[in-house]
Amino acid sequence: MQRSDSTPRKSARAGGLPPDSIELFMQQWRRERSDLDPSPFGIFGRIHRIAGYFTRHADAWLGELGLTWETFSLIVTLRRAGKPYAMRPTDLLRESLLSSGAVTNRIDRVENLGLVRRVADPNDRRGVVVQLTARGRTLADRAIALHFARMSRLLDDLSGDAARNIAALLSELLLSFENAPTGKAGARTNGHKTNGHKPPRNGRRNGR
């Protein structure tokens, strides 16, 4: 995006709030490179920074239950699927917020905790499905209740209308990536298909 006007813009902050860290970065770039428009960074920089704060908070509250993000994401994905709380590994990857790297090893670890088990796929004699155990379902119910409650607390400073508006705008942005034709910028990153997920980095989770 190119600005038609190279004059630095003053940020309009709702309610007289001070500029956030991303706005300060944008002001610096407007000063140093007045020929460029940093406004896209205003969106993606904030998403990235919020995701970092959210990651640290989520790690802490899931840790209260002895869970990592990968274990949590796997068991709540199975719980969300409904009875019989079972999915093929490929479907589990697509429906969860896990990255594709070493998904089999992650299932192994959660199975060793007694939270899931592998059973024969009733629709494919050569395949298996991953199914929640009774213990896994109990923990998934506790974890998702805690997760929703703590996320709600993080949004306490926003009005209901503001939260709904942000969710709607983020949905519009996310759909623009998820619906992008294969081969376009929104569908691939560095030559890798993303399928709506950020390519894995050192086994860590996507974007949070």
Image (tube, rainbow, N blue to C red):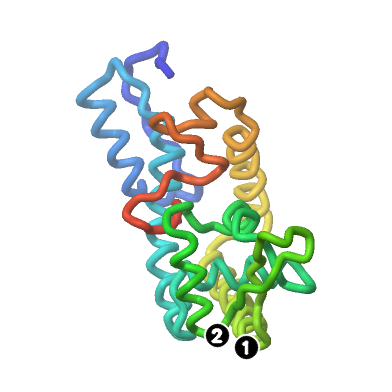
How far from the left and from the top, in percent, is residue 101?
43, 54
Query: Where does residue 79 sit, x and y in percent of width and height?
Result: 69, 72
Q: Quadrant of the C terminus?
A: bottom left
Q: Which residue lies at the image location 23% right of the left edge and 26% below the top edge? A: 31
Q: Is residue 49 above or below residue 156?
A: above
Q: In which quarter of the image is residue 102?
A: bottom left
Q: Which residue is drawn at 49% across and 50% down?
A: 15
Is the residue under label 1 in contact with that under label 2 (CB below 8 Å)? yes
Q: Quadrant of residue 199 in the image?
A: top left
Image location of residue 153, percent across then percent down? 55, 72
Find the distance from the CA under tag 2 to the CA under tag 1. Answer: 7 Å
Residue at figure coordinates x 62%, y 79% from the top left:
140
Left or right side of 25 for 58: right
Q: Which of 105 and 155 is in front in this view?
A: 105
Q: Residues within 10 Å of mark 2 (few under 14, many from 20)?
A: some
60 left or right of 142 in image: left
Residue furthest out toward the front: 126
**Which quadrant of the figure has residue 54?**
bottom left
Above or below 97: residue 139:
below
Badge 2 or badge 1: first in the primary sequence:
2
Q: Which mark is residue 114?
A: 2
Q: Where is residue 42 in the image (x, y as percent from the top left)?
A: 41, 37
Q: Which amino acid does label 2 sit on?
A: Gly
| Pointer 1 residue | 135
